[in-house]
């Protein structure tokens, strides 16, 4: 029998430690701790909504840089993986699947279409990966499309159209014609207006539908004129909103009817110009001009201006920022990066990233938030960014959402 010497024992311990440190298990743990937190960001960089999508990316990048500069999570930085979904549900599903399986994305934030966000959500829900949508949809809150991992940072059509209807219908009349993009966004907006309009006796004279991406609206305008409405509602988005606003203005329909739209986009107003949008009223999730009264808006605007040569963020840009910030804050709160624990932390979050307090409703993970009513202007503009007058702000209120029971969620007391 041989006896080990102290030096020999020491060499054995050191050797064992080195072996453990270089073992595959140890290496994988160390690599996982050092790996970036990857956030997939599928948005339509090409297509009718490209201007809005590009602003979403700019603001999302700002959120990631800001979080990384603050130290990230346990030394781990965030990485934004931007992908073009081409405004196509099939493409959106394919890119999302690649982000999860090939690029190992921890979370998904993005979308800019009611249709693409549902296809993204179908992929993330099946794989139990957290998805925070930054585009309007009513369906994503419904029980059939929802999961623990599904969050909706954006306003939804019921909230947006309802707020605009409650402001506009008492002031401008009851007889309404809708010019509607023929897909989920347009349909859901019309439903929101009609439901809110019941309280004011609003009457639908016609719901005239057009394909997404329509360039020429001349075939619809004589019919709208013949119906002699008090209000014309443009339930379309992006380039469609710009084209229809221009042609309605040129046709002279503003002379007898008030033109409104559920989502009056900053980017659309910039693209369409002052004359085309003069007097058009609508809702928005954010307008940079709120900075005069809301401190978080001023702070957000200043960071964006510094990062992008003095430009101001758009409404959908702000959603890109908030969608990322919310998820990363939930990582900090959960002290974890797995989707289940981060989802639980996110549903408990109360936050004010850029426009006042928001929180996620427990039953459907809809962000409860303010709706801003704005009107486009062409006079007394301080600079090229000063395009809207803020007429009213409808405060966050769960009463303005469809009930959890209506959405199909079981609510326990």
Image (cartoon, grey):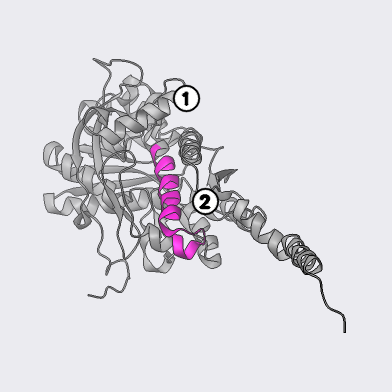
254 to the left or right of 119: left
Q: Main secondary structure of the magenta part?
A: helix
Where residue 166 appears, as percent x and y from the top left, is 17, 45
Q: Which mark is residue 308?
A: 1
Where residue 338 appears, as percent x and y from the top left, is 52, 62
Quarter of the picture holding the C terminus: bottom left
Quadrant hosting residue 100: bottom right
Q: Secondary structure at mark 2?
A: loop
Quadrant hosting residue 259: top left
Q: Is residue 83 visible?
A: yes
Could you give the CA–CA distance between mark 2 and mark 1, rounded to whole angstroms? 29 Å
Q: Which mark is residue 74?
A: 2
Magenta stretch: give its range: 318-342
Q: Secondary structure at mark 1?
A: loop
Is residue 336 shown above or below 235?
below
Residue appearing at x 54%, y 67% in the figure: 126
**Residue 319 belongs to the span the image colors magenta:** yes
140 to the left or right of 73: left
Of callouts 2 and 1, the N-terminal one: 2
85 to the left or right of 7: left
Where residue 197 appears, as percent x and y from the top left, is 18, 50
Along the line of sight, the residue nearer the viewer: 204 or 328:
328
**Residue 325 belongs to the span the image colors magenta:** yes
Residue extending furthest bottom?
1
């Amino acid at each position: 029998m041989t006896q080990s010497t102290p030096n020999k024992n020491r060499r054995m311990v050191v050797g064992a430690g080195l072996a453990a440190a270089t073992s595959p298990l140890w290496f994988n743990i160390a690599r996982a701790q050092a790996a970036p937190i990857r956030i997939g960001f599928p948005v339509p960089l090409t297509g009718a909504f490209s201007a809005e999508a590009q602003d979403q990316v700019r603001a999302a990048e700002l959120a990631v840089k800001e979080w990384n500069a603050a130290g990230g999570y346990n030394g781990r930085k965030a990485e934004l993986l931007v992908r073009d979904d081409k405004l196509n549900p099939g493409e959106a599903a394919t890119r999302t699947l690649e982000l999860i399986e090939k690029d190992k994305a921890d979370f998904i934030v993005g979308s800019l279409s009611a249709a693409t966000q549902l296809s993204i959500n179908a992929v993330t829900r099946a794989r139990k990966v957290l998805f925070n949508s930054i585009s309007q949809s009513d369906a994503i809150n419904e029980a059939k499309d929802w999961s623990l991992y599904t969050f909706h940072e954006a306003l939804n059509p019921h909230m947006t159209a309802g707020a605009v209807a409650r402001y506009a219908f008492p002031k401008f009349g009851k007889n309404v014609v809708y010019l509607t993009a023929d897909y989920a966004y347009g349909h859901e907006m019309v439903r929101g207006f009609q439901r809110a309009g019941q309280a004011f006796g609003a009457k639908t004279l016609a719901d005239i539908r057009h394909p997404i991406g329509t360039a020429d609206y001349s075939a619809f305008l004589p019919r709208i004129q013949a119906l002699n409405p008090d209000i014309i509602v443009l339930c379309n988005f992006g380039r469609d909103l710009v084209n229809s606003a221009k042609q309605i203005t040129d046709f002279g329909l503003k002379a007898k009817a008030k033109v409104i739209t559920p989502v009056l986009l900053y980017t659309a107003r910039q693209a369409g110009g002052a004359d085309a949008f003069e007097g058009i009223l609508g809702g928005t999730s954010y307008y940079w001009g709120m900075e005069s009264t809301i401190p978080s808006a001023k702070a957000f605007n200043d960071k964006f201006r510094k990062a992008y040569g003095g430009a101001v963020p758009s409404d959908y840009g702000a959603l890109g920022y908030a969608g990322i910030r919310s998820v990363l804050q939930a990582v900090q709160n959960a002290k974890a990066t797995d989707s289940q624990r981060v989802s639980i932390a996110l549903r408990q979050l109360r936050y004010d990233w850029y426009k006042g307090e928001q929180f996620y409703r427990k039953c459907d993970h809809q962000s409860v938030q303010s709706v801003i009513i704005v009107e486009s202007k062409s006079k007394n503009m301080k600079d090229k960014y000063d395009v809207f007058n803020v007429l009213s702000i409808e405060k966050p209120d769960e009463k303005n959402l469809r009930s959890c029971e209506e959405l199909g969620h079981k609510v326990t007391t």
